[in-house]
Image (cartoon, rainbow, N blue to C red):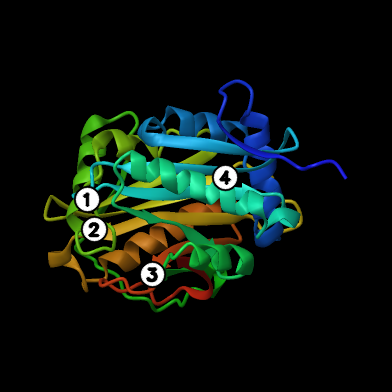
Amino acid sequence: MPEISISIRSFVEGQDERTWIELFNTFYGHYYRPDFEPFDRRDVEWFKRTPWWRESRLFTADLSEKPAGFILSSIDKACKSPKGYIWQFAVKPELEGSEVDKRLLKHAITWLLSAGAKAVQASAGDNMEKRISLYRLMKFKLIRSYSTMRLKPEEIPNNIRTCREVELRIANPLKDNEDLKVLSSIHNKASQEHFDFRPETLEETRAWFEGEGYEDYVVIAWFNDIPVGYVIATISDKPSGNRPKRGFISSIRVLKPYRRRKIGAILILESVKWLTSKGAKLIELSVDDKNPTGSPCVLYDYRLQNCF
């Protein structure tokens, strides 16, 4: 039997994009069907334009000179203590738990530590048993869990109370720099209690809206001419196949002094209204299970995602 060789190499721009896409879709599609939306060239090109790419490294594992997996790691030096993240990590399903899996993770961790990271975080769906076992083997500890919550628009109760004093204004952060500044300011002020928080830059806030293939609806809530909250609803143009078309509440924030006034409720209802007009049959929102601000009570049906 010929010896099987494993080599880890850095991403080669203009050469490895197709491998990145194919391995991502094979691995994550295996776990997230029927909800999975394929990764495509637009997603790759968007990420390469973002500020996060500058502090990222993508490594590919070749098994007998053929791509078998990749890992995308990034270091956040803006944290008080620089932190490393495993953003994406995919191998061919039959290679999970193999030496390919282990070598990729070890290589990414080694690079992150050499770049100054004082800690490394990774995540996995709770159905990814082999991936979770690998993280535990590498001494990762469970520190947080998140839920993806799902809502059918027609099942929203008709008697939800909302704040009548608030004014909703549609924002366009890509064309109006003032809207961008207001949005970023609310996000940073309202997120300070959240796990893993560090202030988001204007460049980072803008980058979230620059991906192709996604339409965003941004609404800012004003109370007595003060911006106090926002919601971002997103819908993809990717084909939904046989599954219901989904819309996403990508982000929602309300400043602490204005919480418990039903401002969040009116923002959610406004986003659901827009997403429904775009053809969404299901609405999703990801929440931190230990979110100190609470989460919208009208959402239900969750799938846990563990964060190590």
The residue that mark 3 highlights is: 144
Q: Which residue is mark 2?
A: 191
Q: Tell me the number on the disc at residue 148.
A: none
Taking depth in this image into account, of 201 and 94 the one nearest to the observer is 94
Report whether residue 155 is seen: yes
**What residue is shown at x 33% (from left), y 38% (from top)?**
115
Instruction: Find the distance from the CA under tag 2 to the CA under tag 4.
Output: 26 Å
In primary-sequence order, the first of circles 3 and 4 is 3
Residue 162 position within the rendered picture, expressed as x and y whole percent measured from the top left: 30, 70
Q: Horizontal placement of 159 versus 167: left or right?
A: right
Q: Position of residue 193 (x, y in %)?
A: 21, 64
Q: Which numbered mark, 2 or 3, is in the foreground of this view?
A: 3
As drawn, the label of residue 81 is 1
Q: Helix or strand or loop: what does disc 3 sit on?
A: strand
- Alpha-carbon span between mark 3 and mark 4: 28 Å
CB under 8 Å between discs 2 and 3? no
Q: Nearer the viewer, mark 2 or mark 4?
A: 2
Between the C-alphas of marks 2 and 3, the distance is 16 Å
Q: Is residue 264 above or below residue 77?
A: below
Task: Verify CB contact (< 8 Å) between mark 2 and mark 4.
Answer: no
Q: Would residue 291 appear left or right of 139 to someone viewing this image?
A: left
**Type of the residue with mark 3:** Arg
Amino acid found under the numbered disc labelled 2: Ser
Mark nearest the camera among 1 and 3 is: 1
Task: Please provide percent x and percent y for residue 146.
Answer: 44, 68
